[in-house]
Image (tube, rainbow, N blue to C red):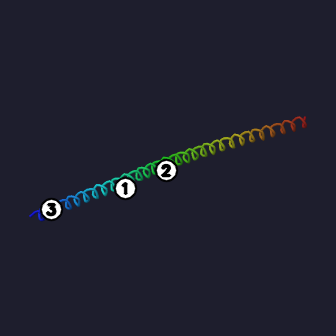
Amino acid sequence: AAAKAKAEAEATAAAEKAAAQEARAMAEAMAAEEAIAAKAAEEAKAAAEAAAKAAAEATAAMATAAMSAREAKAADALTVVQVAKVAEEAKGAAANAKAAEEAARTIKAT
């Protein structure tokens, strides 16, 4: 009977040890999964931040391009105005030259 009790006690102890080891193994597995999940979350956050930064840079680049286009348009408009102004001045100068020429002819004729 004593031997039977001892065997039962040893079996119980072995079972408890096995259960404790199993519990420890599960706890370690869960901790590892949590660490992996946390790392994945960190990486996802970093990726999201990188994507947001890229989007912000793209938006800024588009805004800059739009601004450049507006500036180019404005510069073109300015150029057109300047060319027109120069053309007007040239026309005026030509008219003045013509008038001067006619005046000179008139003076010569008298």
Amino acid at pointer 2: Ala
Check disc 2 and report the residue beneath it.
54
Q: How many marks overall?
A: 3
Q: Nearer the viewer, mark 2 or mark 3?
A: 3
Q: Is residue 67 left or right of residue 1?
A: right
Whether 106 is drawn above or below 30: the answer is above
Q: Quadrant of residue 106?
A: top right
Residue 91: x %, y % from top left: 74, 41
Whether 45 is drawn above or below 3: the answer is above
Residue 66: x %, y % from top left: 54, 46
Mark 2–mark 3 contact, CB under 8 Å? no
Check disc 3 and report the residue beneath it.
6
Label located before the other in sequence (3 or 1)? 3
Amino acid at pointer 3: Lys
Q: Is residue 100 left or right of residue 59?
A: right
Check disc 1 and report the residue beneath it.
36
Give me the residue at 21% from left, 61% from top. 14
* Mark 3 neighbour density, 10 Å: few (under 14) some (14–19) many (20 or more): few
How far apart are the two marked residues, 2 and 3, measured between alpha carbons? 71 Å
- Name the element at disc 3: helix
